[in-house]
Image: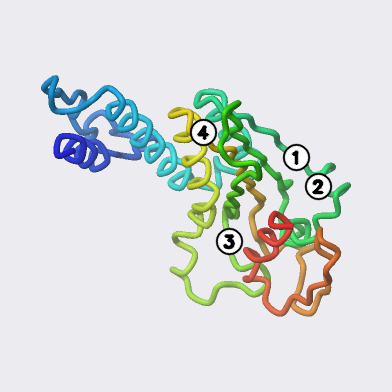
Amino acid sequence: MAAYLLAEGLVLSAYQFLKYKADAKKTANSLTDIGFEKQSITLKDLKQLQAVCEAVYLTRTLVNEPLSYLTAEQLAKDITAIGKEGGFRVNVLGKAKIEQMNMGGLLAVNRGSMLPPTFTIMEHRPAKAINKAPIVLVGKGIVYDTGGLSLKPTANSMDRMKSDMSGAALVTGVMYVAAQLDLPLHIVALVPATDNRPGENAYVPGDVITMYSGTTVEVLNTDAEGRLVLGDALH
């Protein structure tokens, strides 16, 4: 266990996001390999260590990506690629399907955006799953949050808002680990995704919208977008 924890700490602390660095080669760290004595760790633990560290890396990378790359559609594409690599199923609903299903919360938040929303469904369903009803994870996929027309109040309050999709990144990482380790659990993860902007057609405080569940909701603050998109996913 000591070897496992030491290696995990070394690997996770070595993470760097250098994709947009002009001098990436100069700033990259030098950790490339970790060696173990044969008796210090089992093959099972080694496989788990690799899966967990890979999942943390891909989760961090998704969170670090800027909106100039990670739109809602690109998030869905990246999750699809991760699913293919990791071994879990991914189904992406585009705007037309979201409109057909009357996901009013997600569509309302998306109204101010120039870019379409997505709704991504991930599933890990092994033949020998021990649970009859699936475990359902829901991750917020707001790829950028300005607050909408209820604009965030200070200049630096938006600095980290590209990370408002951290929930989506997290559940994607969980699905990757579950599939890589072939956990005997039926798991479904849902990611409603859009950005939240004050566009010319943006939803406004006072609007009443109809959610996917049929419930009507009065919007008093457009910076409460998370509960709207998650509400559609939770129904």
Closer to the chain start, of discs 4 and 1, is 1
Asked where in the image residue 33 lies, by quadrant, the reply is top left
Residue type indicated by callout 2: Ile
Q: At x 43% / y 37%, what residue is drawn?
A: 58
The span from disc 4 to disc 1 (Cα, nearest Å) is 27 Å
Q: At x 70% / y 64%, what residue is drawn?
A: 228
Q: Would you name the residue on which mark 2 appears? A: 98
Closer to the chain start, of discs 2 and 3, is 2
**Marker count (numbered):** 4
Mark 2 surroundings within 10 Å by alpha-carbon count, few (fewer than 14), some (14 through 19), many (20 or more)? some
**Direction from residue 70 to residue 50 in the image, left or right:** left
Q: At x 52% / y 38%, what residue is drawn?
A: 175
Q: Would you name the residue on which mark 1 appears? A: 93
Which quarter shows the C terminus?
Answer: bottom right
Asked where in the image residue 211 lies, by quadrant, the reply is bottom right
The span from disc 1 to disc 2 (Cα, nearest Å) is 6 Å
Residue type indicated by callout 1: Leu
Q: Would you name the residue on which mark 3 appears? A: 145
Residue type indicated by callout 4: Pro
Q: Are marks 1 and 2 in contact (CB under 8 Å)?
A: yes
- Judge depth for marks 3 and 1 and give the one in front: 1
Mark 4 surroundings within 10 Å by alpha-carbon count, few (fewer than 14), some (14 through 19), many (20 or more)? some
The span from disc 2 to disc 3 (Cα, nearest Å) is 20 Å
Q: Which of 67 and 87 is in front in this view?
A: 87
Q: Are marks 4 and 1 in contact (CB under 8 Å)?
A: no
Mark 3 surroundings within 10 Å by alpha-carbon count, few (fewer than 14), some (14 through 19), many (20 or more)? many
